[in-house]
Image (cartoon, rainbow, N blue to C red):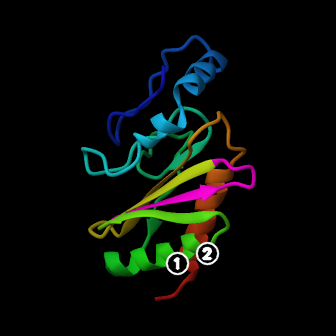
Amino acid sequence: MEKRLKDNDSECKCKSKSDREEGDEILKRMTPDVALTYLGIQHDGGLSPCPEMPNAVCSYFPKDQQHYLEPIPFEGNEESASERIKAIATSLSGASPVSEDGPYLHFEFRSLFGFVHDVEFLIDEDTQRIHFRSAARQGYWDVGANARRMKKIKELFLSIQV
């Protein structure tokens, strides 16, 4: 059964017999169509947690140690942070903007092999943090591609002086 977090302070609970069986079960259920249902700002105002497969990273759930990366700090307003994120994301290979709704940005990244990764940003002007979630739409393991991408975006964002 897919592991999900209920909120920022919850931990995942595994109900499967083994990691391999769990990965097989989730892989069967996590289709591109199902993956799309996890996109967008959720009912709690944040981003969705990552699936338990090692093919995603997120900054919104610090207790999910398998997928957690620190959010991107920023100074200034939502608009300037959004413009910087858009400029950086679209400069990277395979990126296409999908949607923008206030503090929320969604991009698709296509790999050389045609795999689609959804990258979401949620800009929190109050905390001066940009939360993100980067997840493959299908497959069990992304060979660290999402973590590398998000670390690169963070590095580029922090290197730009405002």
Q: Residue furthest bottom?
A: 162
Q: In 3D space, how far apart are the residues under numbered discs 2 and 1 (Cα atoms)? A: 6 Å
Q: Secondary structure at mark 2?
A: helix
Residue type, numbered disc 2: Ser
In this view, the residue in front, 99 or 5, is: 99
Residue for point 55% across, 70% down: 89
Looking at the rendering, the stretch of residues picked out in magenta corresponds to 103-115
Residue for point 59% across, 27% down: 27
In this view, the residue in front, 149 or 107, is: 107
Q: Where is mark 1, residue-wise?
A: 87
Vertical position of residue 49 compared to residue 120: above or below: above
> Which labelled disc corresponds to residue 91?
2
Mark 1 surroundings within 10 Å by alpha-carbon count, few (fewer than 14), some (14 through 19), many (20 or more) = few
Vertical position of residue 111 compared to residue 94: above or below: above
Mark 2 surroundings within 10 Å by alpha-carbon count, few (fewer than 14), some (14 through 19), many (20 or more) = few
Q: Position of residue 48 (x, y in %)?
A: 39, 43
Q: Position of residue 79 (x, y in %)?
A: 34, 79
- Total label count? 2
Task: Determine which quarter of the picture holds residue 80.
Answer: bottom left
Q: Check if residue 36 falls in the magenta segment.
A: no
Residue for point 46% across, 52% down: 59
The answer to whether the residue labelled 2 contacts the one labelled 1, judged by CB atoms less than 8 Å apart, is yes
Q: Check if residue 110 falls in the magenta segment.
A: yes
Q: Secondary structure at mark 1?
A: helix
Task: Determine which quarter of the picture holds residue 111.
Answer: bottom right
Residue type, numbered disc 1: Ala
